Structures are given as structure tokens and as C-alpha cells.
Image: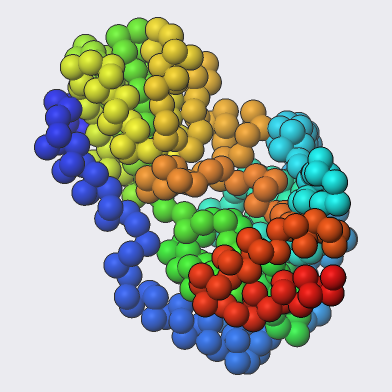
Amino acid sequence: MIDITALNRTTKERFLLSMRRRSTQGYPAEEEAVRRIIDDVLKNGDEALFNYALQYDGCVLTPDNLRITKEQIKDAYRLLDPVLVDVMKESADNIRRFHEKQRRTGFDDTSREGIRLGQRITPLEIAGVYVPGGKAAYPSSVLMNVIPASVAGVTRILMTTPASGKAESEGTVAGVSAATIVAADIAGVTEILRVGGAHAIAAMAFGTASVPRVDKITGPGNIYVALAKKAVFGHVSIDSIAGPSEVLVLADDTADARFVAADMMAQAEHDEKASAILITTSMRLAKDVQKELTVQIEGLSRKEIISKSLNDYGAIFVAETMEEAIGCANEIASEHLEILTADPEKTMEEVRHAGAVFLGPYSPEPLGDYYAGPNHILPTNRTARFFSALGVDDFIKKTSVIRYEKEQLLAASDRIIRFAEEEGLTAHARAIALRAEET
């Protein structure tokens, strides 16, 4: 299923090159299709939005049935197993508790007489969350997107998700997954809209008669959704251009091969382009994991997806030293990094680039996906070198506050004028000089 490869510069570079094929670059036909959709929605608003919903999802939408009603939310609760509802509420509590620690309060610095410098923290007015529909119904993603916005103080949170034209499909209400609806209600969504795809992204970015323009769009989606978010960035803020999911397991000979294989396949089942990587200093572990993968895959519901993912983007590397293994992990900068070594805390001290780190054999990546509390919306495709997990900071603005009294401005006026003149901005200099002339 996956060959065992000695880790060296050549094998590492070859693997990194193959990983680049998973990015959102190189889709000219899809980009052109997305551009046409966005232009159409921008020009024709609701008419275009509803036409695309009919074309792609077979869903007949009008301004009157676009939103999920309070009664439909109650119907969704009735469809779900109460145990699942309790689990989602408990998960939401964990997520909320973690993100509340990220809150900022701003600051004021008045340590110098006559000068006030500060920073105001204010939430965005309206956030838009995109949630995939159809076979990819992920209520956990609803919680992870919405709760940080709610904690940040965003008072209007809009969620879009495609509705099936088969309104009576099992487990759905008005064509939308009941679990998605309930998760949205638990998390604090204020409006649930039954529309998805690139046209939903365009509607949130520019607004229509039925869809308000939002300040930020977050949430995962297919290649068309990802390209639409990329296209509207600048008109609206976005979280990131997310690629397929990935996990890297960093392990020594103390790791349990069963756990490693199970965790690699848990990631591989997301998508055929998902990536699962083991870097270890133990050839014995590498061989045992290779065997476990072939055994454990039998009977899994997404066996074909897992197999293709592992064949195309999986890897088992054997490094000569843990230093070499950690160095490679830092270059890959994986979305999820599991550390299964004798002393995972010590190993983590050398890790510089990862979206989220899972320490020890009893902290598997699915724990972070569903329950622990830290956000599972993470940077992919090596962007963990400079991006972070979604959080409260993504839903706030930081506004600088500056106040100088007359005496303090005059004391600095010559310096400011000199700086402005150096840049050839004489109007800037004059704005300061006028005030100095008053004396």
C-alpha cells in the first residue's frame, strides 16, 4: 500500500513536489466557471442565485423558503438521536471554553503625559459560514466555525449550506442535514440559508436582495467553493484557501503500530487527496505500520478513498536520527502533527511548524476533530509555516487610537516634518507645520 523509504534530501524533495499537486493552483477551467458564476450573481442577485441552486442541487428556492425556520429547527432536533445532541452540546462547551481564553480586551497606554496610544478591539458585524452538504455533512465543522465568531462577539452569523432537491431525504429537513441544522442552533447561528456552491460564496461576498453582504467568510468546501473564496478575497475577508487534509505522525520505536496505522487511515478517509505520513527512526515500526494498514483497512466504509489517498499521497519515511525526522516534519509543516515518542513534550520543543500538535498515544487526531476544544480548522499545504488555526482573532478588528495634546505634538513637530520632507510629502509636513505656527 505504501512503500517504506529512507529519508534523505532526494526522497524528501520528491515527496514535497508531489504534495504540491494538491493545491488549488492549476484549475483554469474551474476558475473560469467560478468567475462566470460570481459575475452572474453580482449582476443578477437572487435570480442567478436561485437558478444555480436549481441547476446544481435540483432545489427550487425563493426568498420565502431560503431560510430554515424555527419550526424546521425543532423538526431537526426531533430527527436526531438525543445522545448525539448531548454529545454535540458537550463538544460545543469544550470548544467555547477553549476559545474564550483567546478573547482580547485592547489596551490604553497613557504612561507619557499628554499622549494616549491604544488599541480598540471590536467584533465583525456579520460573519458568513459555509458548510458543505450532500454526502459531506460535517456538524463538527459547524461548531468549529461558528463558536469562535460567537465568542468574539459577532451578533449576526449567517450559515449557507446546499439543500437537496429531495426535501424528504432521510435525516434531512427541507433538504438540509438535520445534524447540520442542530449544530448550527447549538453554536449560535442566527440565519441558516439553504444554498451552497460558488454562488453562495458570491452572494455572501457581494449581497443580494435575500442574502446580506458579510464581513468574513469561513468554512470548507469543494474546489469550486475554494476557488470562489479565493476570487472574492479583498472584497470580503476569508479564513484561508484550504487544501485537502493531512496528518504527519512523528514516532520512535516506542509507538504502537496499531495506533499509527489507525490514525493515518482516519485522515486518509477524508479525501482521495488527503495525505497521511509517518516519519520514524524505527524500521521495525515502519514495517509493522505497513502491515497494519493492509489489515485495518478491511471493512472500513471508505476503503476505496483511503486506499487511493495512501497510494497517491501517503508516505512512510525512516530517518537515521530524530533530529533528521523533526527537520523533515518542520519542512512539511503538516496540518496535524502527532508525536508518538518516548518523551513527546521534549520532542515538541523542536517543532516549529504545525497546525495542531497531538502529544502521546492517547491524543489521536480525531480527538481534536470532535471534542477536545481547540479548533480543527487548520492551515494545510505547508501554510502552517505562517498561518494559524481559526480562532477568535479571525472575527475581530484591531483599531489604533492616537491622541496627542498640543504641547506633545509641538515637541515632536520638527522630527515629523523632517520625516515627511524626506518622503517628498509636503502636504503631510504642512499639516504639522500649521499647528506649530499657532504658537
The residue located at (28%, 17%) in the rendering is: 322
Where is residue 132 shown, x and y percent of the image?
57, 58
Q: Which image quarter holds the C terminus?
A: bottom right
Residue 348 showing in the rendered view: yes
The residue located at (28%, 31%) in the rendering is: 328
- Which is more toward the observer, 280 or 351? 351
Horizontal relation, residue 9 to residue 32: left or right: left
Where is residue 218 shown, x and y percent of the image?
61, 58
- Is the residue 426 above or below the residue 71 in the image? below
Horizontal relation, residue 268 to residue 283: left or right: right
Q: Quadrant of residue 325?
A: top left
As drawn, the residue found furthest toward the front would be 439
- Which is more toward the observer, 143 or 84? 143
The residue located at (77%, 61%) in the rendering is: 409
- Is the residue 372 above or below the residue 161 in the image? above
Where is residue 274 shown, x and y percent of the image?
37, 45
- Which is more toward the observer, 123 or 288? 123
